[in-house]
Amino acid sequence: MKLAAALLAEEASNPLMPHTYELVVGIFSFAVVVFFVGRILTPRIQKTLAERTEAIEGGIKKAEDAQAEAQAVLKQYRDQLQEARQEAARLRDEAREQGARIKAELREEAQVEARRIIEAAHAQIEADKQQALTQLRAEIGRLSTDLAGRIVGESLEDEARQRRIVDRFLEELENSDAAVR
Amino acid sequence: MSTLTVLAAGTSGADGDVFTPPGLELFNIPPIIPGVPWFTKPVLLALLSTLIVVVFCWSAFAKPKLVPRGVQNVAEYGYMFVRDQVARPFLGKDTDRWMGLLLSIFLMVWVWNLMGVFPLVQFPVASHIAFPVVLAGSIYILKIYLGIKHQGPIGYFKNMMFPPGLPKAIYVLLAPIEFLSNLIIAPFTHAVRLFANMFAGHIILAFFSLVGFWFLFEKLTPLGAPLGVVGVAMTIAMTGFEMFIQFLQAFLFAMLAAMYIGNSLHAEH
């Protein structure tokens, strides 16, 4: 009896001897914590963490995609701009060329026209001159014969004679003109 | 004999004029309700710790948000710590499967230990060896079960006692040592390391606070007063140090658990 009490006291005071009821409480506590924290709650936070990682990675991927798209659009835009510039340059060159050609053609035409007009004018002048000369010759002849007839008092009706006289007169006149000149 | 010293300490410490440092009697706590011998302070604190851990984790992880707030933030920090510092180095890709157990162990041990410095409570649960024994024992059983399951009943012991790549003669020496260290010493030290740290920490705190109390309040003398002041200062400093030790031991306990589990899952090389 006494020995048992002493043993009990010994057991109670030996810090390396676990108390049975504490073992039971410890097992119970551990089981409760493992059940709630380990089995129920940890999977939840693991799921959330995985979702978060996914969300972040998804966000990054989305941003990357958007950036890539923006880059593609920018490239396309630049290509189009470049193309448009080239097209514009080509059109400008073409227009310039065409303008130059038209100008040359017009000039050519104008020159031809001008030449034609000048030639026509020359011909006209020549014709007018001839006509004037002819007229003048006839007029002068008539006047001269008229005058000569009046002066001589004799009608020079005879055509052939009259002409001969006039021609001779004119020749003399021209000769004297040439001598004077 | 220990009973005698306790009795002696009890009588001389309470009634005598001589300062008697606190001893093992610190850990012999009478039941809270007379007649219910199992319901003692450590039992109450163990149950309370369980409640604290469960309530804390429940408030944090019951409905976890993608964008964490408040308690979830704090608890996630703890989770990350256990995952990255305790579990990953030993378990690698198996980490997530064992996080529940390791988080439970870490939080539980830490809260047990924190009871040692919590004002008015001030008793580390793990300084009663039964509690570390439960955890270390569970891990021990789990480790052997996992070892046999993953490496085969013969393979487990063969891998443990006869690691490949050594000269044959070495095994004569190595096999018994490995057997002893893995199956007998490891679980023992696993439990005792935690227990002894908390046990010693509690004695140190009790000693310095008793020095302060004794020389400043019980027997205030001009010569004793400075000693009392030193006692109080040391109590404060040691409390801070204890908190560090408490965290460290919880970390170490969980880390060793992770190591044992990891070694059972994959043969050591």
Image (cartoon, coloured by chain):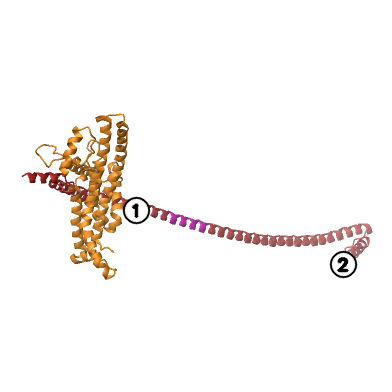
Chain colours: A red, B orange
Q: Are marks 2 and 1 on the same chain?
A: yes
Residue B36, x across and y down, in percent: 10, 39
Give the foreground label among 2 and 1.
1
Q: Chain of mark 2?
A: A
Residue B190, x across and y down, in percent: 23, 53
Residue B258 seen: yes
Our reading of the magenta stretch's main secondary structure is helix
Q: Chain of mark 1?
A: A
Residue drawn at 49 percent across, 56 percent down:
A78
Q: Is residue A118 above or below residue A17?
A: below
- Residue A78 lies left or right of residue A104; in this view the side is left
Q: Which quadrant holds residue B216?
A: top left
- Residue B230 lies left or right of residue A30; in this view the side is right
Residue drawn at 64 percent across, 62 percent down:
A105
Residue B115 lies within the magenta run: no
Disc 2 residue type?
Answer: Ala
Q: Quadrant of the N terminus of chain A?
A: top left
Residue that badge 1 annotates: A57
- Asked if the residue under mark 1 is in contact with the one under mark 2, i.e. CB atoms within 8 Å, the reply is no
Disc 1 residue type?
Answer: Glu
Residue B110 seen: no
Marks 2 and 1 sit apart, C-alpha to C-alpha, by 130 Å
Tag 2, which secondary structure?
A: helix
Give the crowd class for mark 1: few <14, some 14-19, many >=20 residues within 10 Å.
few
Q: Which mark, residue A160?
A: 2
Tag 1, which secondary structure?
A: helix
